[in-house]
Amino acid sequence: MRILKTIAAVLTLPILLIVLWWIATIDSTNPFVPRPGRLVEDFVTVWLGPLLVEQVLPSLARLGIGLGSAIVAGIALGVLIGSNRIVSKILGPVLEFIRAVPPPVLLPVLMMLMGIGDGPKVFLIALGCVWPILLNTVDGVRSVDGVLSDTTRTYAIHGWDRLRFFVLPAALPRIMTGIRLALPISIILMVVSEMYAISGGGLGSQIIYFQRTFQNGPMWAGILVLGLLGVVMALLFRWIERWMLAWYYGQREAEYSDR
Amino acid sequence: MADLSATRTLRVASQRMAVRRDRLSTFLLGALGVVLFIGLWELISRFEIVNSTYFPPFTVVVVALVELLGTPAFWSALSSTMFSWVIGLVISLVAGVVLGVVIGSSSFLRTWTASTIEFLRPIPSVALIPIAIVVFGIKSSATIFIVVWACFWVILVHVTSGVADVDPVAKATARSYGLGRLWRARFVTWPTALPFLMTGLRMSGTIALVVAITIELVVGTPGLGDLLARNQSAGNVDTVFALALLTGFLGLAINTIMMQIERASLRWHPSVRGEVSV
Amino acid sequence: MTDDLRASATTHEPLLSVQHLQKIYPTPGGPIEAVRDLTFELRSGEFACLVGPSGSGKTTLLKCISGLMAPTSGTVTLDGKLVDGPPRKMALVFQEYGRSLYPWLRVDGNVELPLRAAGIPKAERQERVAEALDAVGLAHVPHSYPWQLSGGMQQRVAIARAVAYRPEVLLMDEPFAAVDAQTRADLEDLVRSVWKRLGLTVLFVTHDIDESVYLAERVIMLSSSPTIVQEDLRIDLPEERDQLETRSLPRFVELRHHVYEQIQKAKRGFNADAA
């Protein structure tokens, strides 16, 4: 009974909305609003076809490399800044400023410096994604438990060992939050960089191309692809997070039930 | 203990000095960082470590910046961006608060709209660019449309959490004393939800600026982003860098103002609240 | 890999020597002298308890002895060497057992970690871990996570970790204060048995007077802040202690009474050799 209720709660409103949408567009020739049937058709024929390999995959590759670089850089810098008061104070204002520049603003700058290839796009994604990861890592490193820190010192656990067995795992929950916040940023910057540098190809370029050539159907389908991409990434990440932070959730549950 | 007053004076003095010393070091070290950054920039460019045609020295950029501040094009672009920013935020705020309160107050609504919200929310605002172009054309309304999409969800989620977070015991107590809906809303719901709303508003302020400029850049709607794009295609490298710096300052200004607003409105609020993980 | 733990016993040099330890805290409200002058010595293999009223700087003292905090003046010497940072031959068991165990490591991982950091080869590590877990009665849960265990068991893990580390001196900071009475009794007996079995030197801090008399060979009573040693009492109870038997001995009651009196005096601000 419970399960049925949950399924109903999850599916009812979406299905209702889709049905209303269907009915509202049954005889519509309005180019602004797609018809559900046509949308699915376009999605399958246009996007799951050759476009998938030609345009979508390269986009995803850029996304992956950009995000991956941001994760590595964000954690490394975050640990450095979080552990060292002096470094943190020196870099403070400069980082605050760079962070305040909307990443897309740097796109023209980057394109001037790096040309129109993959370089500026990947760099932009990395640059935009690094902030939430960096800030959350700093937060995580700074808020490690004092008793555990003393324990680590008492047992002469220093240097790399301390980093690997204490600082990083302790900061991991915050780091994962940072990465989760970076996910939507990565998608947005990927699309933005491709919409701006249209000749470079990719998911974003393709959607704008369809819009400019008045192929509204495939355009809408492309937007659907973007939406799905966001949802899939969020879900995937949630699984990874659950797996890596199993101990964290377990501990929180144990603490909670003690109250 | 005759030296009590002397100890006290020493105490106060040492306390003040410690705080001052810390603030001073933060300021000095931060200034050092800025100086190093600027110096590095200048050197990298002057010594052609990166081609100075595409990476002008800091001093040159500053000159271009000052020039830019004298052009009407800049001020008109700035006002377009700020216009889109304000209108977009206001619409998101109103819609987000209204829907947030409605959904947050009813656990039925919360469960039954959750899946829809969770699906629509991650759709990147930029995905709607083609729709915006088709529907609104290359005008500020297109920018506003997308700003609203981006910020509305943030505010909605925060307000919903805030309203839902209201202590059921407090609500029941109020009801049992025969206190009407309006009274409960003002003294129970509002104080609980306010911190969430303010945090959401602060985040939206930053997001709105980023989105507005992005749309202007990519689509060409009026504003700083469009000015930037035009200068880039015209090859005015110095101006492009100057504009980037200016948007940085604008971003900082807005972030600071939003943070002050958040802090001011919550000065009386003792609760510990964290950002909703959006 | 054999440390001669009894080195100082044969030379009659104290293993741990605390001389005129003083600690002054700078606080926002002004400097506070937590510890004024603490002087005492521990010989190898001794079990000493530090008792004092709340606010007598017990935790401060332990932090200074363990090298986590630097004293304002005075010295702490371990085996003839000055302590100016956590020395390798010391282990510290905290009161907050939940926060002193790594939640991302299992029980065996937790006990093993200090050994791993010390560069001890895997085979020996595993042997020591098994031995230690067995000594504290946790041989059956090596693969559990600490937070899956009860409070008492978590504290046992912390003790096992200290035991596997094979320190010369074991410091314990009110380790059983946050544990229920039943469990506390078991853990007290456990500490004594581990102490005897492994020939450790133990400095046990507590506010529980009964516990201090039951456990120790020697009770060092502290005054209230600014702290000095109020009295250093030898406990002449039989070596074999039992929760029921020993605690009902008339001598136990006498000793306990005496310690209680001293602590009361300390609370009222009476220092044995006040200026």
Image (cartoon, helix red, strand yellow):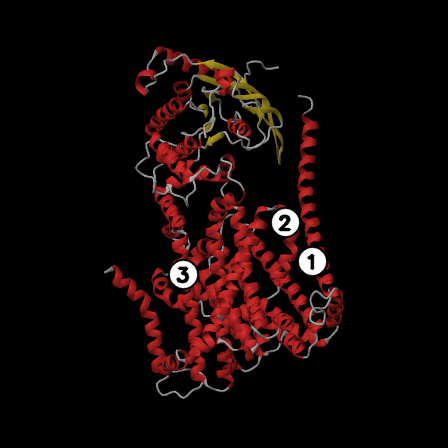
| Horizontal and vertical percent position of residue C52 | 49, 22
Return the residue nearer the eye: A53 or B265.
A53
Residue B117 seen in the figure: no
Looking at numbered disc 2 in the image, what kind of residue is underneath it? Val
Foreground mark, 3 or 1, reads 1
- Give residue B122's quadrant in the image: bottom left
- Give the percent coordinates (x, y) of residue B257: 62, 60
Query: According to the image, label 2 marks what residue?
Result: A87
Secondary element at image label 1 = helix
Q: Residues within 10 Å of mark 2 (few under 14, many from 20)?
A: some
Identity, as a three-letter code, of the amino acid under mark 1: Phe
Secondary-structure class at tag 3: helix
Residue C129 vertical position relative to residue C207 in the rendered view, above or below: below
Residue at the spot of label 1: B37
Distance from the alpha carbon under mark 3 to that under mark 2: 43 Å
Q: Is residue C181 above or below residue A139?
A: above
Q: CA distance from mark 2 to mark 1?
A: 14 Å
Residue of label 3:
B104
Q: Residue at x 55, y 57 (%)?
A: A73
The quadrant of the rendering that contains the C terminus of chain A is top left
* Above-or-below relation of C139 to A195: above
